[in-house]
Image: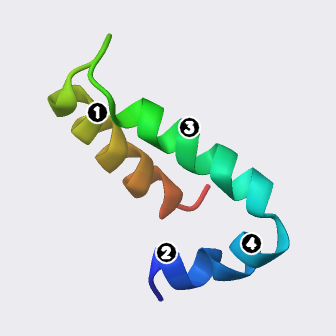
């Protein structure tokens, strides 16, 4: 299931929260303290950790 499909109920039930979440995600993608490469590594680590038990 795609993220868009998973988030669809939240979008319709809590549109203000989803707008804020989208703004946060866009801000996090901007270059600043971290450039793109460390962000990619962090993203991969979080994805791996999300699928680990324990």
Query: In the figure, 15 relative to 12: above or below?
Result: above
Residue 30 shown left or right of residue 18 in the figure: left
Residue 3, x across and y down, in percent: 49, 75
Is the C-beta separation of discs 4 and 3 under 8 Å?
no
Question: In what element is the residue under mark 3?
Answer: helix
Residue 43, x across and y down, in percent: 35, 44
Question: In what element is the residue under mark 1?
Answer: helix
Q: Residue furthest bottom?
A: 1
Q: Residue furthest left?
A: 37
Question: In what element is the residue under mark 4?
Answer: helix
> What distance separates the C-alpha of mark 4 from that of mark 1?
26 Å
Query: Closer to the camera: disc 3 or disc 2?
Result: 3
Graded by Cα atoms within 10 Å as few (under 14), some (14 to 19) or many (20 or more), the crowding at tag 3 reads few
Residue 36, x across and y down, in percent: 19, 31
Q: For the C terminus, which image quadrant?
A: bottom right
Q: Which residue is mark 4?
A: 10
Q: Nearer the viewer, residue 22 or 49?
A: 22
Q: Which residue is mark 1?
A: 39
At x 76%, y 52%, the residue is 17
At x 26%, y 22%, the residue is 31
Residue 23 shown left or right of residue 46 in the figure: right
Q: Which residue is mark 2?
A: 3
Q: Which residue is mark 3?
A: 24
> What distance separates the C-alpha of mark 2 from that of mark 1?
19 Å
Of callouts 2 and 1, which one flags the residue occurring earlier in the amino acid sequence? 2
> What distance separates the C-alpha of mark 4 from that of mark 3?
16 Å
Residue 32, x across and y down, in percent: 31, 14
Graded by Cα atoms within 10 Å as few (under 14), some (14 to 19) or many (20 or more), the crowding at tag 2 reads few
């Amino acid at each position: 299931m795609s993220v868009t499909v998973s988030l669809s109920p939240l979008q319709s039930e809590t549109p203000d929260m989803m707008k804020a979440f989208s703004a946060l995600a866009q801000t996090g993608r901007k270059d600043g303290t971290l450039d793109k490469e460390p962000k990619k590594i962090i993203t991969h680590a979080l994805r791996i950790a999300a699928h680990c038990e324990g």
